[in-house]
Amino acid sequence: MRTLAFPAIAPAQAPPEAAGRDRGDVALLVARRADGSLGLTCFGDLPRLLRAGDLLVVNTSATLPAALPGRLGDDDVRVHLSAPLGGDRWAVEIRTAALERLRPAPAGGRVVLPGGCELELLGPYLSSDRLREARLRVPDALPYLARHGKPIRYAGHGRAWPLEALQTIFATEPGSAEMPSAARPFTHGLVTALVALGVLLAPIVLHAGVSSPERGEPPFPERFRVPAPTARLVAAVRGWGGRVVAVGTTVVRALETVARADGTVRAGDGWTGLVVTPERGLRAVDGLITGWHEPESSHLLILEAVAGAELLHRAYDEAAALGLAGHEFGDALLVLP
């Protein structure tokens, strides 16, 4: 898969609340395709940047405590549950306990889990050399994870934070291995201000799997749902000249999965393997709110499809020069037409 070269944006090590600030107290870089301009403001200024009749589409997937400690042979490991595959089968990632590198996990291996449970490794998932298909032998996955699991984190991303810090205010349906983090800076007060202005909000669900920054991997298939009212609202907003702004690359993937070539959006659910690229282009989305991604992340192809290559590169250069922060607790980028 084609990868893009961008400057690295250092990850934020803590949420704004840890310093006594509001969760929305992060910087927002605004990139406009119409004139190529870039401007820095704060996330709370979003009502000034949107208009009555615009639509924000948000992901209501909630983050799971999807990391489990385990023992594989003589080694302590960390199991990251990426997605359920039906029955007791899951797509999983096995890392060392130090989280610093990927660990080859042999088929037939058994990971001893807390509470006398185990994970049986079956083989590669979709020919991936990183994810494995496995049988999770636990009584009931969600209660088990609530008791024994922790949020997924990676080496260099700071200390562990409680699950509540990795939920957005829109989170209602547990299912994401990692936080759909673009919506994290939203607060109830900000949503109230947007609604009072006349900005509309609509939900989709896309359960995000483990992230894929390490080797420029394409995204794995993910479970999604676009409700019929959301599909109808997207059509109505585009009909009256409003802008459809996706809050996160997960929303782009869900909407573009159910968008026809003429831009009409229909309801749909299931698994999506769509890879949104600049070559494919966008059919349903006009703008995007997102965080700052790893230099070789597949998410950057979505960002290029929204912003265009030249503007996106300038935005990343500007973010690096300004010292903006990335990852779940970091600063944000708003791309507008």
Image: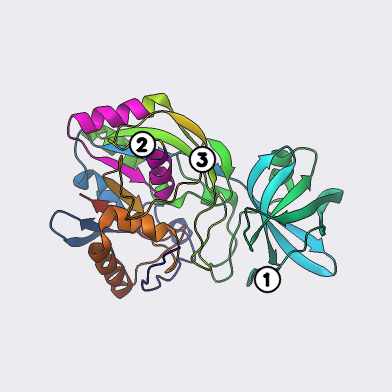
Q: Which mark is residue 259?
A: 2
Residue found at x 62% / y 53% = 126
Query: Image height check: is 335 above or below 262?
Result: below
Query: Dot 3: what SS?
Result: strand
Residue found at x 26% / y 70% = 318
Front residue (pair 239, 205): 239
Please say whether residue 42 is visible from this viewpoint: no
Query: Image height check: is 270 above or below 74?
Result: above
Query: Dot 1: what SS?
Result: loop
Principal secondary structure, stretch drawn in magenta: helix
Query: Image height check: is 308 above or below 247?
Result: below
Sequence-first disc among 1 and 3: 3
Spatial separation of the CA atoms under disc 1 and disc 3? 28 Å
Sequence-first disc among 2 and 1: 1
**Residue 197 picture location, percent across and down:** 22, 35
Magenta stretch: includes residue 242: yes
Q: Which mark is residue 98?
A: 1
Spatial separation of the CA atoms under disc 3 and disc 2? 20 Å
In the image, which residues are magenta? 231-257
Whether residues under marks 3 and 2 lie with C-beta atoms below 8 angstroms apart, the answer is no
Query: Dot 2: what SS?
Result: loop
Q: Which mark is residue 61?
A: 3
Whether residues under marks 1 and 3 lie with C-beta atoms below 8 angstroms apart, the answer is no
Front residue (pair 323, 31): 31
